Image (spheres, rainbow, N blue to C red):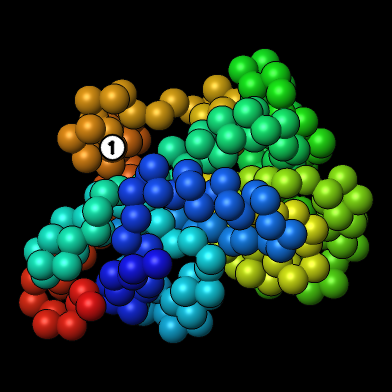
Amino acid sequence: MDMVKIFGVNICNTTLDETVNLLETYLKENKLRTIYTPNTEIVMAAKKDEELRDLINKGDLILADGIGLIYGSKIKKKPLKERVTGFDTSIKLLEIANTNSYSLYLLGGKDGIAKVAADNIMGKYPNINVVGYHHGYFKGSHLGLKNEPEEKAIIDEINKLNPDIIFVGFGFPKQEIWIDSNKDIITGKVIIGNGGVMDILSGNSKRAPDIFIKLGLEWLYRLFQDPSRIKRQIVLPKFLLEVIFDRNAVE
């Protein structure tokens, strides 16, 4: 697959439709495929952290979740085809699973969130077999803790249930670290780090209205909802400035 490298992070140059075709292929294979969905904030963090950058680049499918990545690639005349968000990819996975009666495991969120998300998924997608779920508040490799019994029990449960799809919603970078640390010992076909998707599926939080999404202003809607995000959102103009003045920002 064609790649665009932004500050050293490999981004798959793909569309949502192309991604769906690839997901359908992954789900017919007998190996675990990892999906990461970096946004502008994640790319800026990876720019400063070589270990984190290398971890993301080991993903099988690395999607441009942030609108800033689309703008940055266009500025440097190496345009990404379109933004492919973790939310949209997750919903497409649910649709594929519903069509083909695939199984799903949910890992993440506060206690109770995954269960509500599971109930809502089964209500909307009756052909999906939600085989299990667990909250994200446990000791494990995402916290830098190795050989924790609680984490081992969760992985043993996942492997026993053998889900086709695994959602991991710890937020960045915990979910990426957890997936990378355990991908070689987990049974499944597709595992995706999808942040707050489980909160949305549970109804605990809402996605931005369509007009904000279409205009690439999801970040602005989130800022309206939570002004304290300003410290995080300031990374977007900083990213664009660094792209403009760094000759090698996009390759």
From this view, report whether residue 171 is shown above or below residue 246: above
**Residue carrying label 1:** 218
Please say whether residue 241 is visible from this viewpoint.
no
Please state if 190 lies on the left or on the right of 182 as rendered.
left
Which element type, helix, strand or loop, lies under badge 1?
Answer: helix
Note whether 16 is above or below 35 in the view shown.
above
Q: Residue at x 72, y 31 (%)?
A: 101
Judging depth in this view, the residue of 135 and 13 nearest the camera is 13
State the image quarter where residue 211 is shown.
Answer: top left
Left or right: residue 19 compared with residue 233: right
Q: Residue at x 54, y 58 (%)?
A: 35
Q: Residues within 10 Å of mark 1 (few under 14, many from 20)?
A: some
Amino acid carrying mark 1 in the image:
Glu
Question: Residue 195: percent from the left, percent from the top?
Answer: 52, 47
In which quadrant will I find the N terminus? bottom left
Q: Residue at x 44, y 26 (%)?
A: 206
Q: Quadrant of the C terminus?
A: bottom left
Location of residue 224 in the rendering, given as x and y in whole percent from the top left corner: 26, 31
Give the residue at x 50% y 52%.
Answer: 22
**Residue 222 visible somewhere in the drawing:** yes
Q: Residue furthest top?
A: 123
x, y percent for residue 161: 87, 45
Give above or below for 39 relative to 247.
Answer: above
Q: Quadrant of residue 49?
A: bottom left
Residue sitting nearer the eye, 28 or 6: 28
